[in-house]
Amino acid sequence: TLLASSAASDVYKRQILCSLSFLAQPALAGETIAAAVSEVANQYNVNPLQVVRNIDGFACASWHKNAALLRSLTYRPLTAAPTSAQFLRILTRCIRRGTV
């Protein structure tokens, strides 16, 4: 059913966000966004584009919910929702600084 599908999608998205927490590990400081996306895709046996689309969705939803907060977390002005790479960089910086 649609409700069950939506619930499964929500669980999947939460798993991806939890998986991205490895970006905070100091040993991965030099890791690229592409490598991080590949790591998550491999872990969940999905296409990397699915991971990017989910991150884009989170970035867009975050932008619509609180654009001012996202702007305050960046060093450059944001005039639109961040791309998946920009969003991951923002999250990584915040996690490493302990601001989240």
Image (cartoon, grey):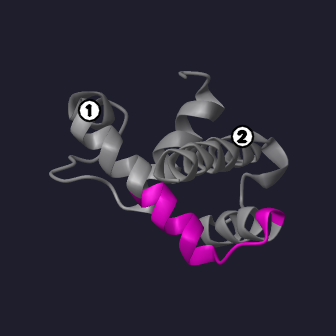
Report helix, strand or loop for mark 2.
helix
- Determine the residue located farthest toward the left in the rendered image: 79
Query: Which residue is rendered at x = 60% and y = 27% of the image?
Result: 97
**Quadrant housing residue 17:** top right
Task: Say few, some or many: other residues with alpha carbon within 10 Å of mark 1 (under 14 / 14 to 19 / 20 or more).
Answer: few
Query: Which residue is rendered at x = 47% and y = 52% of the image?
Result: 2
**Quadrant housing residue 70:** top left
In the displayed structure image, the side of residue 64 where residue 48 appears, left or right = right
Q: Position of residue 83 (x, y in %)?
A: 36, 61
How far is disc 1 from disc 2 in space, using C-alphas? 24 Å
Kindly identify the amino acid type of the residue bearing the numbered disc 2: Ala
- Magenta region: which residues? 43-56
* Tally of numbered discs: 2
Of 34 and 52, nearer the camera is 52
Q: Is residue 53 above or below residue 18?
A: below
Kindly identify the amino acid type of the residue bearing the numbered disc 1: Lys
